[in-house]
Image (cartoon, coloured by chain):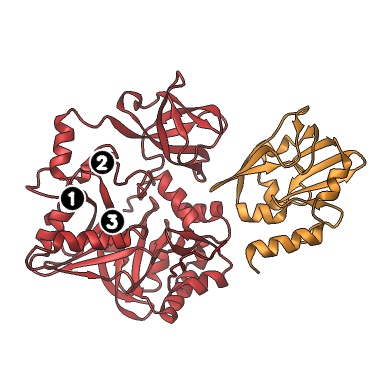
Amino acid sequence: MAYPAEYRYTKEHEWIAVDGSTGTVGITDYAQNSLGDIVFVELPKVGDRLEAGKTFGSVESVKAVSDLFSPVSGTVTAVNEELVSVPEKLNSDANTTWILKLELADAKQVDGLLSAAEYEAFTSEETGH
Amino acid sequence: MAETVMALRKTALNATHRAHKAKMVDFGGWDMPVEYSGLIAEHMAVRTGVGVFDVSHMGDIQLRGPGSLAAVQQLCMNDASKLAVGQAHYSAMLYPNGTFVDDVIVHKLSDNDYLIVINAGTREKDVQWVRSQIGQMPGVHVNDFSDYYTQLAIQGPKAEATLQKLTSTDLSVIKNYWFTWGQVCGLHNVMIARTGYTGEDGFEIYVPSDEPTSARVWGEVLAAGAEFGMIPCGLGARNTLRMESAMALYGHEISDTINVLEAGLGRYAKLEKPSFVGREALLAVQAAGGPKRKLVGLEMVERGIARDGYPVLAADGTRIGEVTSGSPAPFLKKNIAMAFVPVENAGVDGELAVEIRGQSVKARVVALPFYKRPKKAVVA
């Protein structure tokens, strides 16, 4: 699956879409594919302050737990409650299934993240292909 | 980083798994498929239809000679004198202190010939242990046949219908934990055993481990099962299937620090046998009033998934044990775990908790196994 060019990416396999001062965060297709069947998502609360590079929750597949890392700092303005009952949406459409939205603390942090091309190169390195 | 990684061992089907786009993992030093199409789909195929697993990483030790029964009796806790030719049973090799070298399946091939199927992760240790114990015994030879066979597990309610298409041997007369030899996929003298590690009906077949033969049989098995929705299954589903059925996994529910009575496997330890390694230690545990801790089943009551190694807490928050295996159960659609806890906390329906990343999450003690397959309907 292609990685949307308008998103930015982390080496921990999250994506962020930025619109003005609002960021929307999800996990990448590579992440959902490595995890396998996702059965559980632990979400932060609206109002939580996230710090760039720090964990804010987790996703679990049948066989593994994986922490979620915030791409940037900011305050959570919305969480995708649907994922509590339908976590497998992250498998079926990682690119458009959002986990949370946040108000960016510092929009410049986005510049330090990977572009789609850089992220794709990074994942190819990880899988050794 | 320096390249200190040991080369992973491969089964004869390694290239086949990779061609099928399986996700591969290092499992006890073996490069093995953890899943193909998806763990949940594979798990459900075995519960409701049929699936096939490559379990060639399992080891096979043959004890042969007039002294073979005496050797098996001394090495393994179950009573092999009760086995008929063509019959197998669950057993274990123990250390003198009553803990596990490994759990095994003992097959009686003939009066002077036994095959002990052992775990992959403990293969070398097991073979060494058997050789060291057998060294002084008369009339028995030890052969390590581990690399001679590609072992396929065909598991699920449609396993018999699938395999029957590939053999002239009447599978319907093979009872659970019995085996025979027959022609399979045109190969002569293939061992066909009604055994498995999924809690479902099924067969394990042992074919020559050369790559072309292994790949051909794998392909023919999948083709035969296609009409029943058969899919290749990985070690991920194998683990969740055995967990639902509460079957032990070495390093988890059994190990060299867990004794047979703690593990709840006392019914397979025939203490009335005059002698076997570990017997005195188990008698001593019994004489002291039984084990102090016990393996229990847990079902999560609150939202959360218990994982291997997570602490188990009493209702008052005291840490009383540890999860040995924990996972979502795909068929039962519950989050389940097994754990060792003090006997006073082991009562069914008791309320305990599992500490999940710093949070205490409520769980209930339930009877094991979590899942038992439905009895076959008696057809008139």
Residue B87 visible in image: no
**Residue that badge 1 annotates:** B78
Sequence-earlier tag: 1 or 3: 1
Sequence-earlier tag: 1 or 2: 1
Q: Nearer the viewer, residue B38 or B359?
A: B359
Q: Say which residue appears at 49% left-offset and 54% top-offset.
A: B236
x%, y% of residue B220?
46, 75
In this picture, residue B188 sits left or right of residue B273:
right
**Badge number at residue B176:** 3
Q: Kindly report the distance in space between the C-alpha atoms of the residues bearing marks 1 and 2.
A: 15 Å
Sequence-earlier tag: 2 or 3: 3
Looking at the image, residue A8 lies above or below residue A105 = below
Q: Chain of mark 1?
A: B
x%, y% of residue B337?
44, 38
Which chain is painted in red?
A: B
Q: Say which residue appears at 88% left-offset and 44% top-offset.
A: A108
**Residue that badge 2 annotates:** B259
